[in-house]
Image (cartoon, rainbow, N blue to C red):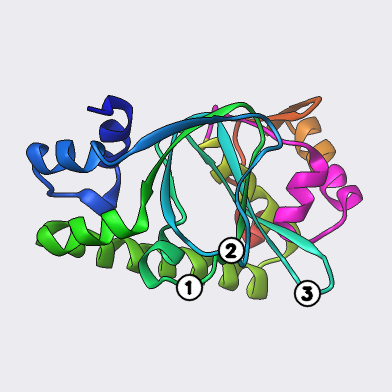
């Protein structure tokens, strides 16, 4: 049995309430693969033939406009599932996934996953809950983009990527800017200000969050 895949599946809201025997059977469908830094896992517009789960490493999720502009949407680490939207509806991938460091992922084929879901009602229930969670996450991003100033959006995204107070994220300022669709210079300005205030620590390709609570509110911007 694929023990790593089972651990990731068990920790996902998608499989909340699924019994151990069912998870064992689902993990048997998973095949592992290791990707190099910079290697593409899936591409926007391609058919969604697999559900992916991260066993180690990090995968950057990005979307590209018709004129070639790129916006980063998320940075997913070990324990994360990805590619579930196209997996479920059979449509094209809505984003591109690229490994930012050496990463090991497992994949479950769409045909086998759907057949499995038909036999297990608990899994179908988890799918509904996961899709609702994705809608809420997307709505929150849209609200931030529409109503919050850049420093608040930057502080919230940085805090989320780092996993909260005391966490650290390995990311360039250029990539961080692409999460917000702003320039690197804008990001650098706020990072330097927050570092002087003792709210973060910045080193080459890394940001450690100490306390961004005041910066994450409009009044603290």
Residue located 21% across and 43% down the image: 26
First in sequence: mark 1 vs mark 3: 3
Q: CA distance from mark 2 to mark 1?
A: 9 Å
Q: Give percent across and percent down for residue 144.
A: 61, 67
Horizontal side, residue 212 vs residue 77: left or right: right
Disc number lying in front (1 or 3) = 1
Q: Can you see residue 144? A: yes
Q: How many marks?
A: 3
Residue 66: mark: 3
> Badge 1: few (under 14), some or many (20 or more) residues near its Cα, within 10 Å?
some
Q: Give percent across and percent down for residue 156.
A: 60, 51
Residue 46: mark: 2
Magenta range is 165-189
Residue located 82% across and 48% down the image: 187
- Label 1 near label 2: C-beta < 8 Å? no
Is the C terminus in the top left, top right, bottom left or bottom right quadrant?
A: bottom right
Q: Secondary structure at mark 1?
A: loop
Residue 7: mark: none
Residue underneath mark 1: 91
Q: Is residue 115 above or below residue 42?
A: below
In this rendered view, identify the residue nearer to me: 97 or 157.
Answer: 97
Q: Is residue 184 above or below residue 21?
A: below
Q: CA distance from mark 2 to mark 3?
A: 15 Å
Check if residue 178 falls in the magenta segment: yes
Determine the image quadrant of residue 12: top left
In this rendered view, identify the residue nearer to me: 51 or 82.
Answer: 51
């Amino acid at each position: 049995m694929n023990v790593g895949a089972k651990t990731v599946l068990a920790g996902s809201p998608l499989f909340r309430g699924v019994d151990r025997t069912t998870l064992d059977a689902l993990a048997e469908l998973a095949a592992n693969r290791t990707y190099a830094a910079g290697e593409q896992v899936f591409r926007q517009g391609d058919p969604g033939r697999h559900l992916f789960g991260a066993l180690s490493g990090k995968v950057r999720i990005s979307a590209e406009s018709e004129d070639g502009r790129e916006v980063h949407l998320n940075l997913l680490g070990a324990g994360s599932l990805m590619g579930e939207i196209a997996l479920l509806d059979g449509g094209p991938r809505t984003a591109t996934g690229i490994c930012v460091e050496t990463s090991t992922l497992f994949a479950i084929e769409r045909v086998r996953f759907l057949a499995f879901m038909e036999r297990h009602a608990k899994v179908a229930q988890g799918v509904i809950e996961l899709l609702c969670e994705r809608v809420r996450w997307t709505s929150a991003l849209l609200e931030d983009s529409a109503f919050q100033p850049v420093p608040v959006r930057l502080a919230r995204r940085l805090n989320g990527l780092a996993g909260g107070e005391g966490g650290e994220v390995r990311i360039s300022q250029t990539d961080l800017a692409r999460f917000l669709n702003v320039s690197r210079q804008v990001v650098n300005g706020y990072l330097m200000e927050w570092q002087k205030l003792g709210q973060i620590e910045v080193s080459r390709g890394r940001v450690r969050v100490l306390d961004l609570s005041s910066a994450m509110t409009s009044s603290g911007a």
